Amino acid sequence: MHTYNPISALLVFFSIGALLYFLFRPSKGWYWILKNQLTSNEKTIIEDVLKQLYHFENSNNKVDMKTLVHMLSFSNKKIVDAINIMTVNNLIYFESDILKLTEKGREYALRIVRVHRLWERYLAEKTGFHKIEWHDRAESMEHRLNHDEVEELSRHLGHPKFDPHGDPIPTKTGKMAQVKGVELPLLQVGAMGRITHIEDEPEVIYKQILAENIHIGSLIKVVENNVTRIVFLSEGEEFKLAPIVAANLTVAPLEKEILVEDNVTRLSSLTENETAKIIGISRESRGESRRRLLDLGFVKGAQVSIDLVNPLGEPNAYLIKGTSIALRNDQAAKILIKKD
Amino acid sequence: METKIQSACETCEHFNRDGLKKLGVRTDNFDFVVALAGNPNTGKSTVFNALTGLRQHTGNWPGKTVTRAEGGFEYNTKKYKLVDLPGTYSLMSTSEDEEAARDFILFGKPDVTVIVVDANRLERNLNLVLQILEITDKAVLCLNLMDEAKRNDVEIDVRTLSRDLGIPVVPASARFNRGIPELIQTISEIASGKMVCKPHRIKSVPENIEKAVKTLTVEIEKEFPNISNSRWIAFRLLEGDKKIIEALRKGEFV
Amino acid sequence: MKQNNIDHIIELSNELRWQIGDEFHDNLTESIYADAADIVKDTVRSKDSERRFRLDAKIDKIVTSKRFGFPIMFLILGTVLWLTIQGANYPSSLLANLLLDIIHPALKSGAAGLGMPWWLDGFLIDGVYLAVAWVIAVMLPPMAIFFPMFTLLEDFGYLPRVAFNLDALFNKSGAHGKQALTMSMGFGCNAAGVVATRIIDSPRERLIAILTNNFSLCNGRWPTQILIATIFIGAVVPKSLSSFVSLLAVIGVAVLGMVFMFGVSWGLSKTVLKGEVSTFNLELPPYRPPRFWKTIYTSLIDRTLIVLWRAIVFAAPAGAVIWLISNIHIGNESIAAWAIHSMDGFGFLLGLNGVILLAYIVAIPANEIVIPTILMLTVLVTGVGVGEGAGVMFELDSINATADVLKAGGWTLLTAINLMLFSLLHNPCSTTIYTIYKETNSVKWTVVASVMPVILGFIVTFLVAQLWRLMF
């Protein structure tokens, strides 16, 4: 060991470590960035442009080249090239400087939307990825699946109607179910409704909604609505949102005739010595977890009480149909109950 | 319920003690296949051991019997192969255990399915029982842990239960070998066709689903007239169960 | 024609599913439970219907209470481990005496009487037989004590309560509370711990439990830890404290293993296993008095003997390899000596040496034979005057004699500490690797489970070695 000394050995070690870190760290590693650069080809750009146009047209907004370049994270030249190809292929046309989808372009865009939403649904039902990741993963997957794979995926999922955010999934033929409801800020104080859709873009706002633990399918009642904030009650808890955040929630107002269960709360709010009846399981609980809860007896009408309180806070054990079942708090928050 | 079901008590006297031979793992040349199903923690493995004379390890856990254990016994010159299925809460999810249990009852076509339940927690256990009864009509309910139930002041009207479920019900305490002779006798009667069950079918289904199920059942029966569990297949198709769809395509139900 | 009809049925079911909507599964389960409730109403009379049975509730209140829950748990686990390590001493030395000191010489002289050539008798008796005998002597007694005790606790119903108490900790690292049990099982034997992960029914958490089970210091490694700690760490403190300090060092290594288990679990759940499905449910079954003798019998048959048999199957060829590399010469050096010299440089970087690295390579089948192999190889390269000859594993009766051999091999306190660390952080034994493959059915996860701990071991020992050399 002629040239050995501990310091140089450590230096070599840490520089190799740092290099590996910068190459492979999740999502921002150079290796991944490079890989993305190489794979984001013409097809990706064309499909992204189509999708943007589709969303803009659906919300009755108009797009010119400048906004488009601004919206997409590709170089100007690449976008211009793509637009040229798209006009030649009769996917889009210009009306003065406004970009518009042709019938063919619209069909193509719908197909991309279909893949995106199906994939989100797949991630929600069949994998353990966190909600925050669904959108980004679907963004890259939508360019990769071919026609047959999409049909196989749809079949595998049982041809679902909605994605996990409540957005309708277009069918093979472009048919789409309607999302009922209006943006939350449009509801009057005292109005009741059911959350039918949670928009997952922009990410900052979506993260805020997730942090509040607001669930799709929950019943809400608006108690305050002004320019600074919107306050509503849902499942026994009070939520306060800024109007810009609340606008990302779509709520279907309830028709008068529907009988509303009062005092619905979450199982996680049950305390020792209380008993309750189960009203149902929130839509937030999906796939395998939901089935498991049902199989264990957490079904509508069942009696439930706390059997054991955990020394570390969670999971608590609930007595359901004669057996003690431990659930973590995030699971218990998705079971709706009415206390006796 | 038109068929008269013999209650377990009537069968006790017929039990032929000399005709019983526990065969352990020697299960070659069997005449009948018997599946053993049940929730976790119902003493299913104890019943298995009591029937076969084996000493399979049992644990006070869900999900213990993952590998399928097999054993056998001989009764009145007929040989029975006993297959211990994984303990599950249901047959409708997609976990490995549940699929294994489901596939065996569905495609393995056992001559008798013994469903072991905990007498103390009958309601919860019935979830699995009612699902199994949709798949097969040759089943017997083993009401295990009767000793515990007695200690806990739980009383069960076996006769009514048997009538409601449409299958024979045998109360037992497998730990103490109680009820095992009656169980063996009942198994043999079902296997030989002496006893015919008319199992309960799920009733409280919402109208819109029931209608869809009926439509599908009619179509399935048109295609496979001899199938006994068309309604269950309809349930699975509506659920979008890929495996069942594949099986239907390949005609594995005939 | 027929196929058309079937396609029609499937098409129809798709159409109907679309009409019924997403709530089919919920509705069906609810209907089944409604029927169940109806039936139960007619047939079951219970005086105390929804309440859980009183004795159970009382026990549960105590074993999950804030004040007693954790002390009871540590007391029970501590007792089980202590009984295992202490209780195994006597039968182990008895077995070692029988198999190594009586039968081995008898076999040797028998072979000589038959006129067996030296290479055949060396290969079979010094190689294969000795490795197998060693594994049995070291492994059988602790396992025969540990597994029945563990199984009794399991059958009584206490273990699910442990999972219940500890779940919050495991949840933070993305794991399942039941991993507490597979981890404890790993203290007995990692292969058995891996099999025990079957109780975890969530795919992601089960994989985590399988991949991190090796961080539980198993029975095969406890004796190594205790021996090295006694020789080297106990020696640096005053005599009166030495046994206490060496015990502390061993416990420290075991606790470090748990720290790694939590850390790696966390890392795995955040990176490679992020997308695996994760669910949680834990049933707390009623307590049932275990049937003592039956449990002892079945746990011996089911767990101990099966694991022992697998270990023997893997140890036999390892014994043969150890004998062969020590006795086959290339040029004027045996393969073993050549391998040791070529790995000495890398070993030095890690604060170890070539002997240790070679011992860990050939002793992949069983951690039990690491120390005998190290001693044999050290004698082989240093020429110290003890031992039984090339390729014949041995252990010395006195700790001092062992210490002398190791010091002659150039061992320092750093070597000892790093050996203890490397004994904790290296690939699982081949029995465990094989079991992981059987349980996961995946080459990928088997490779991850085998390679990841070695890399961690390299990193940790390397860092310790450099810092040590900087400081002292």
Image (cartoon, rainbow, N blue to C red):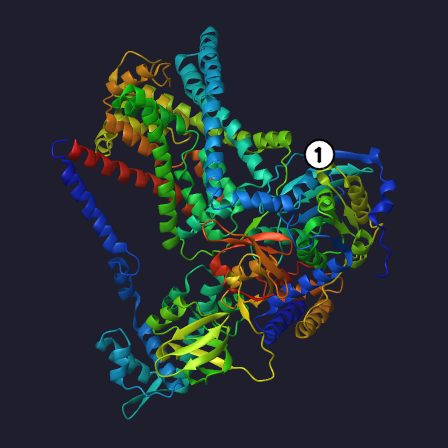
Secondary element type, mark 1: loop
C183 vs A158: above or below: above
Label count reads 1
Q: Chain of mark 1?
A: B
Percent across and percent down for residue C139 are 47, 26
Residue at the image position 55 percent from the left and 56 percent from the top: A272
Q: Which residue is mark 1?
A: B53
Work out whether residue B28 can be spotted.
Answer: no
Residue at the image position 16 percent from the left and 36 percent from the top: A6
Percent across and percent down for residue A49 are 33, 79
A196 vs C82: above or below: below
Res A52 quadrant in image = bottom left
Number of other residues with Cα within 10 Å of mark 1, as a class: few under 14, some 14 to 19, many 20 or more: some
| Position of residue A21 in the picture relative to residue C267 (left or right) | left
Q: Quadrant of the N terminus of chain A?
A: top left
Work out whether residue C240 can be spotted.
Answer: yes
Question: In the orientation shown, which residue stands out farthest toward the top?
Answer: C113
| Position of residue C72 in the picture relative to residue A230 (left or right) | right
A192 vs B131: above or below: below
Q: Quadrant of the C terminus of chain A?
A: bottom right
A272 vs C415: above or below: below
Q: Nearer the viewer, residue C207 or A338?
A: A338
| Position of residue A11 in the picture relative to residue C376 (left or right) | left
Question: In the orientation shown, which residue stands out farthest toward the left?
Answer: A3
Residue at the image position 55 percent from the left and 31 percent from the top: C148
Percent across and percent down for residue A102 are 38, 87
| Position of residue C237 in the picture relative to residue B108 (left or right) | left
Q: Amino acid at mark 1?
A: Gly
Percent across and percent down for residue B168 are 80, 51
